[in-house]
Image (tube, helix red, strand yellow):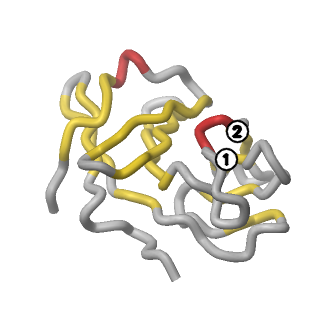
Amino acid sequence: MTFAKAANFSDLPDNAAVAVEVDGVEVALIRTGDEVFAIRDECSHASVALSEGDVTFDDAGTPEIECWLHGSTFNLRTGEPVILPATEPVPIYPTSVDGDVVLVDVENPLKKES
């Protein structure tokens, strides 16, 4: 795996998205408590920034991000769309936290584009 610095953990607000660029890839970073999620910062339906959407949780407590334009929601653990109109998943990336540094591996997505 090839991890690169994406942000400082202390700079990430809880339950919100922040747009960053990691090795030329636009990524939305989302911190929920002590966990950090990284998802491609582009809705698979409308090609708009997911980082501008709201972070929500399903009934089981799974974090999701909502596209602000049409309301599609994506599971942050799988990248799968939860709410239409999006039907294609969005790539998600491995993350690691080393002290205050958030690392993301954009070269080895956990969920590849279809």
- What's the residue at 16%, 62% (across, down)? 1
Assess whether mark 1 and mark 2 are in contact (beta carbons under 8 angstroms): yes
Residue 14: image location, x then y, percent: 56, 24
Q: Nearer the viewer, residue 112 or 101?
A: 112
From the image, tell me which residue sits under label 2. 53
Instruction: Read off the residue under disc 1.
Output: 65
Residue furthest bottom as drawn: 114
For this view, does 101 lie left or right of residue 82? left
Q: Residues within 10 Å of mark 1 (few under 14, many from 20)?
A: many
Residue 33 to residue 51: above or below = above
The image shows residue 8, relative to residue 22, as above or below, that is above
Residue nearest the viewer, comparing 113 with 99: 113
**Residue 80: percent from the left, percent from the top?**
63, 69
- At mark 1, the secondary structure is strand
Residue found at x 29% / y 36%: 6
The x and y percentages for residue 100 are 25, 22
Disc 2 marks a residue whose amino acid type is: Gly
Amino acid beneath label 1? Ile
Vertical side of 7 occupied by 64: above or below? below
